[in-house]
Amino acid sequence: MRPLEAVRQTTVIIGSHDMALDILANHLRKRFPDASLSSANVGSLGGLSAIKKGECHCAGTHLLDEETGEYNISYLKRLLGDRPAILLNLVYRQQGLMVAKGNPLNIKA
């Protein structure tokens, strides 16, 4: 439904969502008005599966290998085999709970 040139100038990212992708899309739109970024949020394994099937250009992933303590590498090797790929860290983040001032419910974990 879109002109072929517009499709060719769209980068497709499938996988785990991060707000950094929305920020990146806005930045790219300002710098390259004819280009766009399209993302679909299907989880880390879904993104790697989409890469394997050739359905996207990039995949968002954050999969911890509990044996090695490393993220993503063992999953890439297992799912993509010898297929050439580049693993790029886009962001680091911390997750946690926000509680009311003074933590009135004494939430610890």
Image: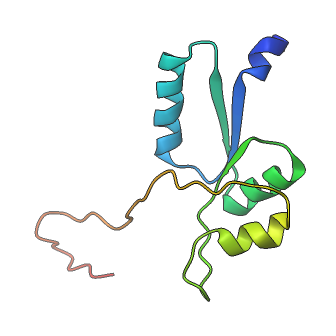
Looking at the picture, how far across and down is residue 68, in whole percent?
59, 85
Q: Could one spot residue 95 in this view of the protein?
A: yes
Q: Quadrant of residue 32?
A: top right
| Residue at the spot 73% in from the left edge and 63% down from the top edge | 45
Question: Is residue 48 toward the left or the right of residue 100 in the image?
Answer: right
Instruction: Pick whichever, 94 or 75, lies toward us.
Output: 75
Question: Is residue 6 toward the left or the right of residue 96 in the image?
Answer: right
| Residue at the spot 80% in from the left edge and 51% down from the top edge | 51
Outermost residue on the left side: it is: 102
Please determine whether, in this image, residue 37 is positioned above or below residue 42: above
Looking at the picture, how far across and down is residue 61, in whole percent?
63, 59
Please determine whether, in this image, residue 19 is positioned above or below residue 75: above
Question: Is residue 21 toward the left or the right of residue 87 in the image?
Answer: left
Outermost residue on the right side: it is: 53
Looking at the picture, how far across and down is residue 70, in whole percent?
57, 76
Please determine whether, in this image, residue 72 is positioned above or below residue 30: below
Please determine whether, in this image, residue 13 is positioned above or below residue 43: above
Outermost residue on the bottom side: it is: 67
Q: Quadrant of residue 9?
A: top right
Q: Could one spot residue 2 in this view of the protein?
A: no
Q: Quadrant of residue 37?
A: top right
Give the mark count.
0
Which quarter shows the N terminus?
A: top right
| Residue at the spot 20% in from the left edge and 80% down from the top edge | 106
| Residue at the spot 18% in from the left edge and 63% down from the top edge | 100
Looking at the picture, how far across and down is residue 102, in whole percent?
10, 70
Question: Is residue 22 toward the left or the right of residue 105 in the image?
Answer: right
Which quarter shows the C terminus?
A: bottom left
Coloration of the structure image: rainbow
